[in-house]
Image (spheres, rainbow, N blue to C red):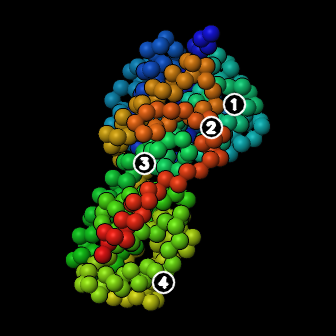
Amino acid sequence: MKPNIKNIAVLTSGGDAPGMNACIRAVVRTGIYNGINMFGVLQGYQGLINNNINPMDARSVSNIIHLGGTILKTARCLDFKTEEGLDIAFENLKARDIDGLIVIGGDGTFTGALRFAKKHGVKVIGIPGTIDNDLYGSDFTLGYDTAINTVIEAIDKIRDTADSHDRLFFIEVMGRDSGCIALRSAIASGAEAVLLPERETSVDELVAQLETGASTKKSSSIVIVSEGHKDGGAYDIAKKVKERFNHYDTKVTILGHLQRGGSPSSFDRILGSRLGFAAVNELLKGNTMRMVGLRGNDIYTTTIEEALTKHSFKLESDLLEMTKVLSI
């Protein structure tokens, strides 16, 4: 029997990621196409608690597919972690007869959605929106591809000045405990070394690698450091290396929130559209507490619980090997 879904709300929560607007657009228009009343929640879970829930029509999402950030805004909400916060949010949804909720975000967003669904029986579908690419159940998360392209563009510019001045640059990139951004940007930018949370690389190994490059007349070097590396960030590692290796003038660049902004790549626009379309259709099938994700070139679902608790090693073995082979 087909579920009687009449009203669906969508929100973005946690850190913003390029492609979220393309996703919101797909959610809203897919719902309207299927005769559903659509609502947008401003400021994520805080908006649910503050009753900042507004009707949306097809024109509400016109001309946003190319925009970075999220038109629904986002916020981190401590109140949603409390029982009282969950109860207030549910009453606000209930007052509008909202039958389904689509949440776009990362693991914090999904943790809140799971608690909400279990406590109040709200039908929830998650869409993985995070540049970190650290959720199980999707080969690529929304915003990851754009973030890599942003990082590569920045490194290319840093390479110009590094080469002009015979410098060693340590460049810190985002990703929390995931080295996905660091690994792919290192390969694509021709970095001499990359330090990843998932793989141990001692300062001794790094210094030996840099010394080999210097002995073969490399005029500059780029080292990519993932922010979750166990030996610290780029400044910490640069300091340790400089104490033992001073062939180059050493500089540090932390790319920071630059990586979260910008117009989404074609890949993220299409991925956001596919995931948004799929999320609405999952609700219409009666499914709940599931995440839609890309595996291969197809969209599959994973339980939100699995997405949060299972971990997959997303660093390709050939890319890991290439970081050494291609940096000679």
Of labels 2 and 1, the one closer to you: 2
Q: Name the residue under label 4.
A: 204
> On residue 246, which mark appears?
none
Q: Mark 2 points at which residue?
A: 304
Gap in Å between the C-alphas at discs 1 and 3? Answer: 27 Å
Q: Name the residue under label 1.
A: 117
Dot 4 or dot 1: first in sequence order is 1
Q: Which of 164 and 126 is in front in this view?
A: 126
Gap in Å between the C-alphas at discs 4 and 1? Answer: 49 Å
Of labels 3 and 4, the one closer to you: 4
Vertical placement of 173 versus 18: above or below? below
Q: Which residue, as the protein is rendered here, is positioned at the far left?
A: 164
Q: Position of residue 145 (x, y in %)?
A: 38, 48
Give the residue drawn at x 45%, y 26%: 277
Gap in Å between the C-alphas at discs 3 and 4? Answer: 31 Å
Give the residue drawn at x 46%, y 32%: 299
Dot 2 or dot 4: first in sequence order is 4
Q: Do the residues labelled 3 and 4 touch (CB within 8 Å)?
A: no
Q: Identity of the amino acid at label 4?
A: Asp
Dot 3 or dot 2: first in sequence order is 3
Q: Identity of the amino acid at label 3?
A: Tyr
Q: Mark 3 points at which residue?
A: 144
Q: Nearer the viewer, residue 192 or 132?
A: 192
Q: Where is residue 69 in the image (x, y as percent from the top left)?
A: 43, 42
Q: Position of residue 9 (x, y in %)?
A: 56, 25
Gap in Å between the C-alphas at discs 2 and 4? Answer: 41 Å
Relative to residue 12, is residue 170 drawn left or right?
A: left
Q: Is residue 228 visible?
A: yes
Q: SS at mark 3?
A: helix
Q: Identity of the amino acid at label 2?
A: Ile
Q: Identity of the amino acid at label 1?
A: Ala
